[in-house]
Amino acid sequence: MRLSGATVHRDCDGVYVKYSKNPKQWDFLNEQAVYMADYGPPFVEILGIAHGRYWMKEYEVAFQLHWAGLEQAIRNAKSSLDPLWATDEPRFVDRNWIGAHRRRLIELCEMNGVVNFYRRLSDMFESNVVENESGLTVCRATHGDATLSNVVFGPDNSFRWVDPIPPSLWLPAFKAVDLGKLMQSSHGWEFVMSDRTPPPHCDNEVLHNEDVIDMLAAGYFHALCYLRILRYAEKGSLPHNYAMNKLYELLG
C-alpha cells in the first residue's frame, strides 16, 4: 500500500499489477502508465493498461540503504535519470504555470491545515524560482517523485523507476523538481520510514555540477516535498510527523 492509496501486488509469475478501488484515482493511474510506456527506460516496462490498473514487469525489490551507501545511491539515481533530463527536446511549459502553482500552493497549505507555512513557502517560490524562471532547466521529461523509495533493479542492476508523477500545469518538467525530490532522500527519508537513524545530509551529491539557478529552485521544491506528503499521510503517522518536522526545520 502506498501513501496514495493505490495497491501493488504480484499478479502472476514475472508480473506485478497496480490498481485502485477508488474511481477518482483511475485517470491518474492510466496517465502514469502511459507516461512510463511512452518514455521507456529508466522506467519499468509496462506490459498492459486497463482503466484504473496497469501491469508491469517484475524487478528486484528496492535495496536496503546503509549509511555508507547513500551517497553512491544518489549518484546512481542521478545517472539513471539522465535520459529523462535531456534538454534537446524540452517538454512544453505553459506560460500560465506560475499562476497555477501559486494557487496550488495555497490549496495545499489550506487542505493540510498548515497555513502558517504559506508565507515562507510563497516567498521561497518567488525568490528561488519565479525570479530565475528563464534560467531553469526544462527537460524532455521528469520523474516527479524521484526518491530512492521509487527505485527497483533491472537484471543488470540498473536503476529502474516506478510511480512517476507526470509534469502538469502547476509542476512542469523542470530538472529542479527531481533534484528537490532527490534531496528528500539525501535527508534520510527512506531511513526514517524504516525506523532507522538517518545519516548526515548529502545534498552535495544531489546538487553536484548543477547550475546555480537549478540549485536554488531545488531548495524550494525540496521544501514542497513535505507539503505534498501531508496531503496523503494520516495525521499523527510517521510520514506526517516527519514531514511536519522537516517543514519547521527548512522554513523556521
Image (tube, rainbow, N blue to C red):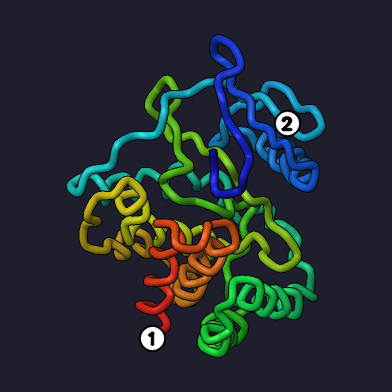
Drawn side of residue 25 relative to residue 110, left or right = right
Mark 2, other Cα within 10 Å: few <14 / some 14–19 / many ≥20: many
Q: Quadrant of the N terminus?
A: top right
Q: Quadrant of residue 244?
A: bottom left
Secondary structure at badge 1 equals loop
Find disc 1 in the rendering and name its residue.
252
x then y, percent, for residue 43: 57, 36
Find disc 2 in the rendering and name its residue.
53
Up-down relation of residue 216 to residue 177 (above or below): below
In this figure, what is the number of numbered marks? 2
Residue 211 appears in the figure: no
Residue 183 appears in the figure: yes
Mark 1, other Cα within 10 Å: few <14 / some 14–19 / many ≥20: few
Front residue (pair 77, 1)? 1
Residue closest to the far top: 13
Q: Residue at x 37, y 55 (%)?
A: 189
Q: Amino acid at mark 2?
A: Arg
Up-down relation of residue 155 to residue 101 (above or below): above
Measure the C-alpha gap from mark 2 to mark 1: 41 Å
Q: Residue at x 54, y 13 (%)?
A: 14
Choose the circle earlier in sequence order: 2 or 1: 2
Q: Residue at x 54, y 64 (%)?
A: 230
x then y, percent, for residue 158: 41, 31
Q: Quadrant of residue 95?
A: bottom right
